[in-house]
Amino acid sequence: MGEDDRCRDEQGAPALDAHPKGADLVLNKVSGAPGFWIGNVIVMAGMPSIMQAMLDEVVTKLKSGVRMLSETVRADAREGDIGMQLGEIAKANPEVAIGSYPFFDPQHGANMNVVLRARDPQKLALAKRAVEDMLERVRRAQSRRKQGFESPRERQQYQ
């Protein structure tokens, strides 16, 4: 935004509450300095309490559509252990966005969360169940492997 786009006071200097011409002001009941709304952009204060008060002013004017639902499943597995199976579940559930987010657990080492997002609650639930079932099969296979009971044929059964 250039200086020429800002509002000016009576002497032509940039106004203290400078905002682009044509923008609607967003009331700030906490500190008084307004934010502004232009097009699909809302500019608010960065302090959480002030921003919350300003958000309360605009929330009823925001357009919304069908809500995006989200579920998170802790994998208790590494990405490399379940990546292929997770890809198959994603292919079988094209209306569900599935992401894997690795993290390090100080007690258990490498781990990851699987996050599923969809607008349809039934499709989300089916995909979540598929992920949970797959994770259970992987955990059983890993447990059997640790105990030395798994044959190559059994390994394929759990994957």
Image (cartoon, grey):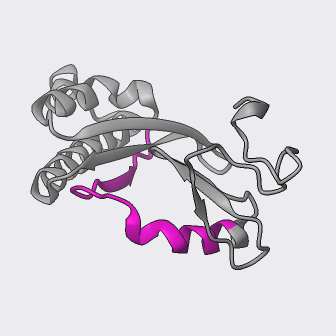
* Quadrant of the rendered image containing residue 4: top right
The quarter of the picture where the C terminus appears is: top left
Question: Most extreme residue toward the bottom, as rendered?
Answer: 29
> Which residue lies at the image location 26% right of the left edge and 58% below the top edge?
67
- Whether residue 92 is visible to the viewer of this picture, yes or no, is yes
Picture coordinates of residue 127, whole percent (x, y): 17, 46
Question: Does the magenta-highlighted stretch encompass residue 40?
Answer: no
Q: Give the extent of the magenta segment.
A: 51-77
* 81 or 112, nearer to the observer: 112
* 110 or 47, nearer to the observer: 47
Residue 61 position (above or below residue 83): below
Picture coordinates of residue 140, whole percent (x, y): 29, 44
* 13 or 147, nearer to the observer: 13
Residue 79 position (above or below residue 29): above
> Which residue lies at the image location 37% right of the left edge and 52% below the top edge?
73
> Which residue lies at the image location 84% right of the left edge and 45% below the top edge?
14
Picture coordinates of residue 16, whole percent (x, y): 84, 55
Question: Does the magenta-highlighted stretch encompass residue 74?
Answer: yes
Count of marks placed on residues: 0
Residue 45 position (above or below residue 11): below
- Horizontal side of 84 relative to 79 (left or right) equals left
Picture coordinates of residue 152, whole percent (x, y): 21, 20
- Horizontal side of 94 relative to 2 (left or right) equals left
The quarter of the picture where the N terminus appears is: top right
* Quadrant of the rendered image containing residue 52: bottom right
- Whether residue 110 is visible to the viewer of this picture, yes or no, is no
> Which residue lies at the image location 24% right of the left edge and 44% below the top edge?
131
Question: Most extreme residue toward the front, as rendered?
Answer: 10
